[in-house]
Image (cartoon, helix red, strand yellow):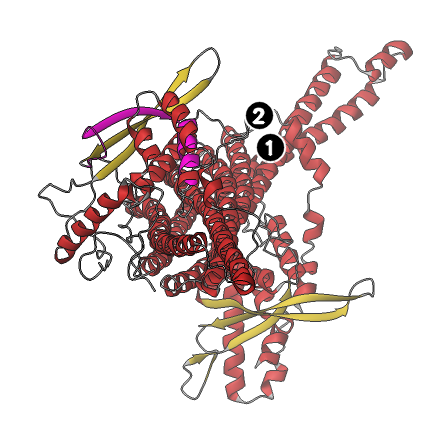
Amino acid sequence: LKIIWGSLPKALRPPLWEPLLYMDAFCFVVCNLLAFVFQMVEKGTSLLKKLEMNVSEAEKRTGKNSVNMQETYTVYLIETRSHITGIYSGSDGSTPVPDMLWRRYSEFELLRTYLLVTYPFIIIPPLPEKRAEFVWHKLSADNLDPDFVERRRVGLENFLLRVASHPLLSNDKIFFLFLTDEKGWRDAVLETGFQDKVDSRLKSLSASFRVKNPDKRFTALKQYSDELNTAISQLLRIRARVADRLYGVYKVHGNYGRVFSEWSAIEKEMGDGLQSAGHHMDTYAASIDDILEEEEHYADQLKEYLFYTEAVRSVCRKHELIQYELEMAAQDLTYKKQQREELATGTVRVFSLKGMTSKLFGQESQEQREQKLMALEQDIKEGEELLKEKNQECHEFVQSAWKDIERFKEQKDRDLREALISYAIMQISMCKKGIQVWSNAKECFSKM
Amino acid sequence: MMSVGAPKGLPSSGQKPITEMIHPLSAVEEPLSPAPEVTVNAGGDKDTGLTNGTPVETSSPASVSSLFNRLQLDDDLDGDASTETRDLFVTVDDPKKHVSTMETYITYRVSTKTTRIEFDLPEYCVRRRYQDFDWLRIKLEDSQPTHLIPPLPEKFVMKGVVDRFSEEFVETRMKALDKFLKRVADHPVLSFNPHFNAFLTAKDLNKRQGLALLTKVGESVKYVAGGYKLRARPAEYASMGDYLDTFSGKLGTMDRIAQRIVKEQSEYLTELREYGTVYSSWAAVEEELQRPLEGVAGSVSTCCRALEDLSENISQDFLPVLREYVLYIESMKNVLRKRDQCQAEYEGRLEAAVLRRQEDRTPIPAEVEKCQDKVECFNADLKADWERWQRNKRQDFKQILTGMADKNISYYEKVSFFLIRSREELEGS
């Protein structure tokens, strides 16, 4: 079945019915069904809402890289389960067929770059960080550290789920192939030629500076995005320092455990109470490890939105670029029209080399002038077409982008509120644990 | 084997101010720890003497009869253990700064309430400075060499490191001075010391200091003669010594741990404060999220305030007691050493006397017997004081450790209370 599925896209283009004549009826039906399904994907229905997915495992691999050197890297297992009618297994056809493949982080990056280029008006969900940042001292910054890998696994799954739940991105064919075609996906994504559409950094940077009439909403959004970025960066940095200090406070209490134990050895009546209290101090000191591990989840939620601000900035930059190109096209057209007027009336409004040379070396012949005028008219016509195009492009961009921005704002408010609530819950739990331990210790002291 | 030496003391009064302590003649009863057992010689001997009938030479002659009175008092109240048997109440409070051309110093008000006949009036109120307390301690040590004298807070403080006139420092010192006087007041022998009496009552202590100095000089020197070396410390005193050494070590460790905790908490507090402000500045750029973020900033502030309280408790209530006991241990070790010397003197004299008797049949002089009495008296006093000290220690440490636990519980309760309210707001809105 998989073989048929895999070969189908190519087989469909010029429909080759001959091979099917040699298959039995059952396969014939299935193949048609698959064809229908695939067409649906191409038409862009929200099929993928019915596709379950998760990143369930991570594994270390070693292999030769592009420069033929040995390297160790981690691969992640993506499991998908489709509820498309027809692709079911089991005698009663009740269990959906699971699909699974392995992907490494760089492949996720490639997918994301493709999405960024293909949907520049969409705020593309971010990937989990490439290298561990904002770490407090006990947390490893090593990419191969199992805790880091685990947190990355969760982040990658989150990325896939975000894309899959986006009304537009979820229907992307390349995204679907990423989830289902382990070997063929890379070629497919390169075939789209998206690399050619990448705007050069220089181009977008210069556009940012030179655009004259940026949309005020985008300017405000860019500013907000920068402010949010600053706020979350600061927060994460200080949170790491706070975690370090809190760790220190808890761990020092562990020393009480040892000294109480030693002291209890020389006491008669006080001995038992001291000894037990010492154990509670040890428990207290040990409890901080779990507490801080849980807090990393909160940090990860914040980090996602930190990286989201980059995606927002991307969209703003793209708008600036489009706006700039629009302005350039308009400016260019105006200039050409001016030239035509000059040529037609013979007046030299604007200083030009042509004007100077004609003054010095005599005017052109009527024939030459008419030729030039014709060429100019053609230019102007093309220019007007271009302006119309750019206007349309800009208008569409702003509309689509703004729709997505509104969606993003609501999502952000919702998600961050949830994150703050779960952070509060974590802190409350930490307090409860503290009260418990110290109450136990108090009881031991009272029995001294 | 003596059946009674110096009477065992009453339990320490702790740190209650004078107004809270119940007058022995008041109707309100207060539960006490079980009254110490005191056995009186059969026949109701008026002397607190040894079984062989020799009267004990104490250095507070005026106190013998009153000592017996106290014994009888204890006896009468044996059946009624809930009545307060104290008849001397001392409090230290009301610190005041005095500025003169020569120096600046603090005085404290020392208030006394008593029914004892050794005092002319039932109530006294005097002002004393640290110097005066120091004088008292020295006099007590000199005049009561067989007893454990409670410690005073540290005399010298490094200028520039600690502010001698800060509220915190004065408060801590005052509490320690109050404790010192209460311990002396509770001691069945020390409380009857005339220097103590003078300290509590004299309008102008300087004059009395002078007088007292003349009459009582060299008291301890007379009591224990040097030059004798003890061969072996008896097991029970050796184990006391060992205990004190180990315990002192543990106290030092705990002191370091507590200081470290205060330091870590202070650094945590610094970071927390910044953490709170970041949430506030983020809130300023948000709309929907403004209130939730301000809520978090509020939680962090609550945490900061609660943490300040906690650290303060360690510095002001916990550490001073640890340090006091280190000084107490030094005091006790001194007493043990003096006891050793006393015993050494006796054994030395005895040996010499026995040798002489062997040589020329000279009988053992009475001095040697007097030495034996001294040793036995010393041992009795020391053991009684040791027991009292152990009881006080147990109570004091129970109190500060329970206090430490309470403060920590209170910290978490304050923080979680605010957080729970915050969470409700977050989920509701």
Q: Are marks 1 and 2 in contact (CB under 8 Å)?
A: yes
Looking at the picture, how far across and down is residue B371, in whole percent? 44, 53
Residue range corresponding to the magenta coloring: B116-141
Residue in front for this viewpoint, B401 or A236: B401
Residue A422 visible within the image: yes
Pointer 1: what residue? Answer: A323
Chain hosting mark 2? A
- Residue B168 visible in the picture: no
Quadrant in the picture for the N terminus of chain A: bottom right
Marks 1/2: CA distance?
8 Å
Q: Which mark is residue A213?
A: 2
Q: Which structural element holds mark 2?
A: loop
As shown in the figure, which amino acid type bears the numbered disc 1? Gln
Q: Indicate which disc, 1 or 2, sits on the residue closer to the N terminus.
A: 2
Instruction: Report the side of A309 relative to B311 (left or right).
Output: right
Q: To which quarter of the image does residue B14 belong?
A: top left
**Circle 1 sits in a helix, a strand or a loop, which is it?**
helix
Chain letter of the residue carrying label 1: A
Mark 2, residues whose alpha carbon is within 10 Å: few (<14), some, or many (≥20)?
few
